[in-house]
């Protein structure tokens, strides 16, 4: 009877109808190097009928199985995106798997997904992707993924992003500044008196990440494009380096100004030692340790 009812529904009516309860589930998406999104819904079994809404996109390879890989009965509610309806069962866990073939697009080396989902999604990326951009905000992920708590986002990432290394010498010290971007980087210069790093970018609207050694130039930073201040994103600090991300809307000269510059920062060390020595002397005079 349910099958007959589903077949007789109009498309407009199917957009609104629900046939089951909201499930307890974990949704995971793994993106491969070809831009295919492999989706799995790990749904906790229930004595109630459950409805699992799928993600938007062109779907292939739909399967519904239990933890042993055996097929599980299901129905599909033909709306967009489709929903999988699970009848009551004694299964502890049910796995709904499918692939989305058209959700990611590659343009000028950048993969982009206009993502939209109502619930929590764990998302994993191709090997070699250690940072992503979420609605123009850079995020360092390392070898991990991200958890999206529902809603819309513009997801961007680059596989095998080029890294330009610029060496800075000051007295006997050597520092490497890394610039990750798909555009050409030219006229790199470090200025100790002005506490700044300067370089030119050849193209507009390109993702740019600058990895700065803290021993060379200390945070916080101000970033300028052709003398105009722009919004920067200090989004990761591993204790020795800071990741600084931005997207210049035109080509031109990037000017990064820090708070403290080499060799000013190392001077804090002898200053701290001097203060500590004074405190020790004061305590020694105040207390009798005999």
Image (cartoon, grey):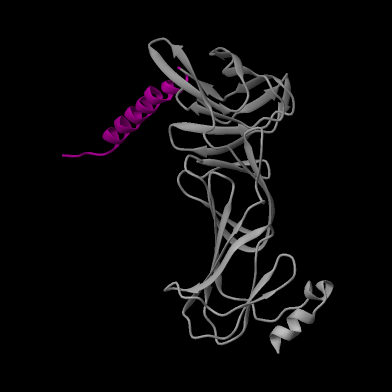
Left-right relation of 289 to 21: left
Left-right relation of 213 to 205: left
Q: Position of residue 39 (x, y in %)?
A: 56, 60
User: In the rendered structure, does residue 140 fall within the stretch colored magenta?
Assistant: no
Furthest residue in direction left, as rendered: 290
Residue 248 visible in the displayed image: yes
Left-right relation of 129 to 54: left
User: In the rendered structure, does residue 268 fall within the stretch colored magenta?
Assistant: yes
Q: Residue at x 56, y 80 (%)?
A: 73
Range shown magenta: 263-290
Q: Nearer the viewer, residue 167 or 9?
A: 9
Q: Is residue 84 above or below residue 106?
A: below
Q: What is the quadrant of the C terminus in the image? A: top left
Q: Is residue 226 above or below residue 290?
A: above
Furthest residue in direction bottom, as rendered: 1
Q: Position of residue 203 (x, y in %)?
A: 69, 23
Q: Position of residue 96 (x, y in %)?
A: 55, 69
Q: Is residue 166 above or below residue 114?
A: above
């Amino acid at each position: 009877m349910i099958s007959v009812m589903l077949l007789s529904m109009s498309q407009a009516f199917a957009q609104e109808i629900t046939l089951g309860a909201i499930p307890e589930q974990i949704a995971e998406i793994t993106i491969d190097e070809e831009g295919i999104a492999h989706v799995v819904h790990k749904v906790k079994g229930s004595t109630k009928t459950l409805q699992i809404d799928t993600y938007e996109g062109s779907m292939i390879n739909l399967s519904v199985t239990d933890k042993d890989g055996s097929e599980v009965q299901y129905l599909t509610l033909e709306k967009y995106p489709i929903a999988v309806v699970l009848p009551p069962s004694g299964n502890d866990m049910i796995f709904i798997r499918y692939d989305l073939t058209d959700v990611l697009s590659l343009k000028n080396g950048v993969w982009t997904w206009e993502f939209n989902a109502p619930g929590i999604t764990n998302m994993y990326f191709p090997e070699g992707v250690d940072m992503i951009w979420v609605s123009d905000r850079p995020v360092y992920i390392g070898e991990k993924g991200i958890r999206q708590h529902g809603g819309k986002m513009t997801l961007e990432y680059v596989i095998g992003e080029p890294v330009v290394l610029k060496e800075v010498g000051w007295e006997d010290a050597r520092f490497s500044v890394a610039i990750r971007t798909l555009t050409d980087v030219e006229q790199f210069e470090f200025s100790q008196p002005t506490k700044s790093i300067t370089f030119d970018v050849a193209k507009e609207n390109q993702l740019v990440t600058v990895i700065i050694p803290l021993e060379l130039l200390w945070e916080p930073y101000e970033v300028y494009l052709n003398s105009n201040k722009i919004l920067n994103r200090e989004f990761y600090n591993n204790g020795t380096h800071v990741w600084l991300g931005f997207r210049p809307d035109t080509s031109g000269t990037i000017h990064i100004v820090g708070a403290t510059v080499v060799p000013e920062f190392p001077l804090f060390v002898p200053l701290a030692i001097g203060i500590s020595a004074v405190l020790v002397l004061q305590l020694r005079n105040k207390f009798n340790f005999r």
